[in-house]
Image: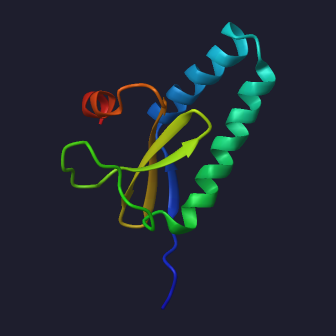
Amino acid sequence: MEKKQYELKILPLFEHDLNAITDYIAYRLRNPDAADHLIDAVEKAIYERLPMAESFEPYHGIAEREFPYYWIKVNNYIIFYVVIDSVMEVRRIFYIKRNMKKLLSEFG
């Protein structure tokens, strides 16, 4: 059986989320090293998941969607992505203590 290959697509909304988070850490909390480490951890987690994007249980608790959300936990953050055909589309990243159901229903 041939292993499925996934293409990676990062949405601008995800980039905006990640920039806001790392700006907060670097400038508001004055810890640029922690912001850099988070970026490295996020990138590593995404690329580790890429070869097996659909091998995990989808995120439950939001409305049924054409493309279910999957998630990756990185430190105190959750990355959400969907798989469309052979594309792993990374959509959002949120602080883990936020209301995920509300955020995902608002932003999709």
Q: Which residue is drawn at the image coordinates 69% and 34% (left, top)?
A: 38
Q: Which residue is drawn at the image coordinates 59% and 51% (left, top)?
A: 46
Q: Is residue 31 left or right of residue 15?
A: right
Q: Which residue is drawn at the image coordinates 42% and 67% (left, top)?
A: 86
Q: Is residue 50 left or right of residue 98?
A: right
Numbered disc total: 0
Nearer to me, 8 or 80: 80
Residue placed furthest toward the front: 97
Q: Which residue is drawn at the image coordinates 29% and 33% (left, top)?
A: 101
Residue placed furthest toward the bottom: 1
Residue 104: x %, y % from top left: 31, 34
Residue 107: x %, y % from top left: 31, 30
Q: Is residue 24 left or right of residue 6?
A: right
Q: Quadrant of residue 28?
A: top right
Residue 95: x %, y % from top left: 50, 28
Residue placed furthest toward the right: 33
**Quarter in which the C terminus is drawn:** top left
Q: Is residue 62 left or right of residue 4?
A: left
Against 88, residue 100 (above or below) is above
Q: Quadrant of residue 39?
A: top right
Residue 68: x %, y % from top left: 30, 54
Against 89, residue 96 (above or below) is above
Colour treatment of the image? rainbow
Nearer to me, 4 or 38: 38
Residue placed furthest toward the top: 28
